[in-house]
Amino acid sequence: MPETGIPATPGPEEDVVDLLLAQHAQVEQLFLLVIGSTGDTRRDAFDDLVKLLAAHETAEEEVIHPLSRGLPGGGGDAMVDDRLEEERQAKETLRTLIAGGVDADGFDTGIILLRDAVLTHARYEERYEFPLLRQHVPAERLRSLAAAVRAAEKTAPTRPHPSTQSATGNLAAGPALAVIDRVRDAVRRPSDS
C-alpha cells in the first residue's frame, strides 16, 4: 500500500465508514496529482492510485457490499449490484490505462473519464450505502469492520481484476492475484541500491 496518511490501525472510534470516506478523499487527491503532474511524479502517483483503488474495491467487495445486501429499506441487492457494475467498468478502464502507461496517447482523456466515474461511484456509496450501514449496523460492529477492511486490503491484488468482483471470487483469487501482482510490481520497480 502507498503511504496514505491514514493511521495503520484504526483509532478506537474510527469505524469502517470513516475509513472508507478517508480513502475516497485520498483517491480524489491522487487523481488530482496524476492529472496535474508529468514524468516520474505522474507515474508514481498513478501507481499509488492503482494500488489504492485495487485494495479499496477488494475490501468493499469482500466486507461492505455483502453486508449491505441484507440491509432493510435500501434495496440492498439492487444497490450493491449497481455499485459492482460501476466497479467492473472502472476496473476495465483502469486496466486499459495501465496497459498503455501514463505516456500513451489518450491517457489524459482516459484518466479524466476514470476520475469522473470513480468519484461518481464514491458519491453514490457515500449518499446511499454508507448511511444505511450507519443506520442499521451497530456502531461497535462498524468499528470492528474497519479492522476487517484493513485485513482484506493486505491480501488484495495491486492491479484491477474485473473478473473477481464478488466476495467469493475475491476470497478465492485475491491472495493468489496479490502475490502475482506484488511480484510484477517488484520486477517493474527500479532497484533501490
Image (tube, grey):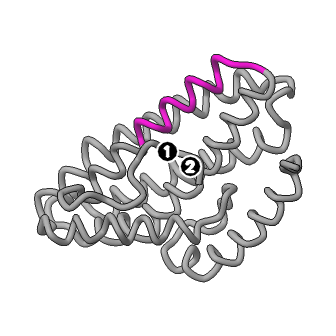
Front-most of 7 and 71?
7
Front-most of 128 and 177?
177
User: Considering the image in quadrants, where does the N terminus appear?
Assistant: bottom right
Q: Residue at x 28, y 63 (%)?
A: 76
Front-most of 157 and 3?
3
Q: Residue at x 72, y 27 (%)?
A: 42
Q: Secondary structure at mark 2?
A: helix
Left-right relation of 25 to 45: left
Q: Position of residue 71 (x, y in %)?
A: 20, 67
Residue 175 sits above or below residue 98 on the image: below
* Nearer mark to the viewer, of 2 and 1: 1
Q: Secondary structure at mark 1?
A: loop
Residue 48 sits above or below residue 174 on the image: above
- Magenta residue check for 3: no
- Amino acid on which disc 2 is placed: Leu
Left-right relation of 77 to 178: left
Q: Position of residue 115 (x, y in %)?
A: 55, 31
Left-right relation of 35 to 76: right
Q: How many marks?
A: 2
Secondary structure, magenta segment, majority class: helix
Q: Which mark is residue 52?
A: 2
Q: CA distance from mark 2 to mark 1?
A: 9 Å
- Amino acid on which disc 1 is placed: Thr
| Residue located beneath label 1 in the image | 4
- The residues colored magenta run 24-38
Q: Residue at x 57, y 73 (%)?
A: 170
- Magenta residue check for 31: yes
Q: Position of residue 77 (x, y in %)?
A: 33, 65
* Disc 1 packing (10 Å; few <14; some 14–19; many ≥20): few
Tell me, yes or no, whether the two marked residues, 2 and 1, touch with CB atoms within 8 Å. Answer: yes
Q: Residue furthest top?
A: 36
